Amino acid sequence: MKKSIIFSTMVISSLFADTSISQMKKELELQKANMQMLEQKIENLSKNQNSSVNKSASFSQKSYLPDIALILNMSAVHRDVKNSDFENFALPGFIDAGEAELPFNKDRGFNFNYAEVAMSSTVDPYFDAFAIFHLHPDEFEIEEAFIRTRALPNGFRLKAGKFRSAFGRLNEKHQHSWHFDSQAIIYKALFGPDMISDPGVQLQWVAPTDTYFMLGAEAFQGSNDRSFGDTQNNNLYVTYAKTSIDLSDELSMLTGVSYAQGKNNVNGSNPTKIYGFDLTARYQLGSYSAITWQSEYLKRDKDIKTRVDKQAGLYSELIYQYNNNYSMGLRYDAITKNETDLSTYAGIDTSGLKRYTAMVEYHPFPMSRIRLSYMHDKTKIINNQRKDINKVMLSINIAAGAHGAHNY
């Protein structure tokens, strides 16, 4: 009896084992079929993806239309100096009488300063393109036109074309984005209204750190004849380091050092060296309220063969933004060193070259601005006399179209 039971158990176990093996084989075949189906789907998706990439790679006019912005700037000026006299002012040691360029707010009365057309577009996955055209009443100017890389590795970015240098804090900014309508005196003295702006190349590197740190190097033709001007070869080279630190949730600080070296064309070809330091602090009072303090110090050593002129100056401005509509500010400009030949101004006091400016502005909307300013200028020689100039100005700036935000 026991043998029969054992035998029956073995037979039943064998039958179940056969059934399990058969079932497993069926499941394995089903898995293989599913795998084949998945592989086929992946292959089909890959084909479709390649097909769509090829289609998008072909030129589409609609996809490549650039963003376009139009900026209009105009002013009404009251000044206690006649236009003909003001056009022939001298800034001792820097600008001789009659050599000043006055593209903005030139005349007493009404001024249409410029219309600016800005265009930008993504070219492809590797490049962006930018162009800024200035239309003055009697001149058309390509202010900037350059390409910039989008996808260089390790924090690098390359720019090539005609563009403004990132030297210092103010040089890269356009006139409509300044806190004051008049150019800082030391920038006007060393670079003129066009600043450092030339055909060239730029390489920047941003460190992979939580704190912003950027190094940059630029090479330009060097056509700015206020400090350089020898363009037989590209002669101007600029380097800088910039960093930004958040000292608290409300307080942030930006600072940088800059250096430019090129050749001037006075008495041959001689070196000019310019050093710069900038500091900007911003304290956020609320969502739309802040206090910003911005200052720069620039120093120039200009070798003109017979001597080396050593000159320096600074500006410092304080801006209080009450809300997103109203702001007010003060600026102080000064020439702090002027070791050069001033014999042309014999008998004229050329010390204490300073300027004071106050402004209040109203933004009906972020893209429009009305600004009222007062300036007391103690830097000018007019008709061979030191002349303090007072100026009251009302300016209007309008921006229409796709225009990017400015740095504070």
Image (tube, rainbow, N blue to C red):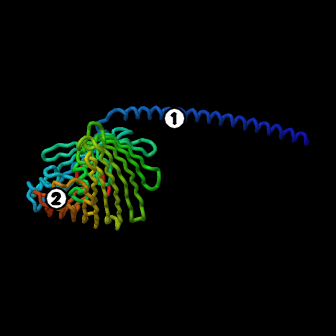
Locate residue 150, reporting x and y percent: 38, 42
Check disc 2 and report the residue beneath it.
380
- State the mark number for residue 42: 1
- Judge from the rendering whether residue 354 lies leftward or rightward of residue 242; answer left or right: left
- State the mark number for residue 268: none
| Residue visible at 28% across and 67% down in the picture | 322
The residue lying toward the viewer, choosing from 295 and 312, is 312
The residue lying toward the viewer, choosing from 19 and 150, is 150
Locate residue 104, reporting x and y percent: 17, 53
Residue 398 occupies quadrant: bottom left
Characterize the local packing of mark 2: few (<14), some (14-19) or many (20 or more) Cα atoms within 10 angstroms: many
- Residue type highlighted by circle 1: Ile
Above or below 226: residue 366: below
Name the mark nearer the viewer: 2 or 1: 2
Locate residue 344, reporting x and y percent: 16, 54
Tally of numbered tags: 2
User: Under tag 2, what secondary structure?
Assistant: strand
